Image (tube, helix red, strand yellow):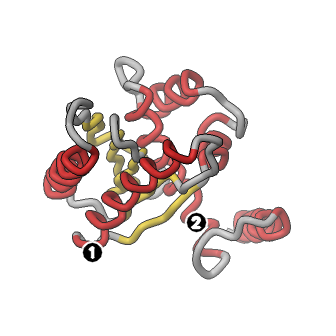
């Protein structure tokens, strides 16, 4: 399965593509779409959509893993992030790609083992896990971490019969199911 991770932003949109085959994960590509910051917001959104469409065409992912919206103290920043997420969700939907969304703390916890990890820690773990020659830019590292999160969370979601359950009780139940199936199999 090919997974496209996307870290939305109106100034820098990170993307990362990985392939998961059983327990093997391989890096296919990553990058950052950087619209000219002097452009009006609407034009930057067009640049983001065009760049993302090129990535989708190039890699033909089966799944999109996107950072979910979280609360900002700055309403303007939250609104701009919402615009970028809208472009991302639209591009994925137009391509017929199923979308999974993960909170930043879930992604950090999945990749580093700590939900409050900083960007450098995430980039370092992504580099190590994927065997990259150097750490990707933080936006691309976050996008690769989103793709890896999908690959690690998908088996749990399948056992739960659908989308990820976010409660502690649901996560504990999923871990018990995984533990039982590992002992049986």
The picture places residue 62, in percent across and down from the top left corner, at 31, 66
Which residue occupies the foreground of this view, 9 or 22? 9
The residue positioned 20% from the left and 37% from the top of the image is 39
The residue positioned 65% from the left and 49% from the top of the image is 106
Name the residue tied to disc 2: 155
Q: Quadrant of residue 108?
A: top right
Q: Quadrant of residue 72?
A: top right
The residue positioned 48% from the left and 48% from the top of the image is 146
Which residue occupies the foreground of this view, 95 or 3? 95
Residue most extreme to the top = 134
Count of picture labels: 2
Can residue 1 be spotted in the picture?
no
Which residue occupies the foreground of this view, 185 or 136? 136
| Label number found at residue 96 | 1
Quadrant location of the N terminus in the rendered image? bottom left
Q: Quadrant of residue 155?
A: bottom right
Label 2 neighbour load within 10 Å: few <14, some 14-19, many 20+: some
| Label number found at residue 127 | none
The residue positioned 25% from the left and 37% from the top of the image is 33
Label 1 neighbour load within 10 Å: few <14, some 14-19, many 20+: few
Residue most extreme to the bottom = 161
Residue 33 to residue 84: above or below: above
- Quick one: SS at disc 2? helix
> Would you say 38 lies left or right of 103 here?
left
> Would you say 129 lies left or right of 92 here?
right
Quadrant location of the C terminus in the rendered image? bottom right
The picture places residue 7, in percent across and down from the top left corner, at 42, 45
Distance Cα–Cα, label 2 vs label 1: 22 Å
């Amino acid at each position: 399965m090919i997974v496209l991770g996307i870290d939305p932003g109106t100034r820098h949109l990170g993307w990362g593509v990985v392939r998961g085959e059983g327990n093997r994960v391989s890096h296919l590509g990553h990058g950052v779409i950087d619209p000219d910051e002097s452009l009006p917001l609407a034009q930057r959104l067009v640049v983001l959509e065009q760049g993302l469409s090129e990535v989708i065409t190039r890699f033909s992912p089966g799944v999109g893993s996107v950072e979910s919206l979280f609360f900002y103290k700055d309403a303007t920043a939250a609104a701009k992030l919402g615009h970028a997420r809208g472009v991302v969700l639209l591009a994925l939907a137009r391509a017929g790609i199923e979308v999974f969304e993960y909170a930043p703390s879930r992604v950090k916890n999945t990749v580093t083992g700590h939900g409050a990890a900083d960007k450098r820690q995430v980039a370092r773990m992504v580099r190590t896990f994927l065997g990259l020659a150097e750490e990707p830019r933080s936006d691309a590292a976050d996008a690769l971490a989103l793709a890896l999160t999908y690959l690690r969370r998908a088996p749990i979601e399948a056992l739960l019969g659908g989308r990820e359950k976010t409660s502690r009780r649901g996560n504990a139940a999923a871990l018990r199911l995984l533990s039982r199936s590992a002992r049986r199999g």
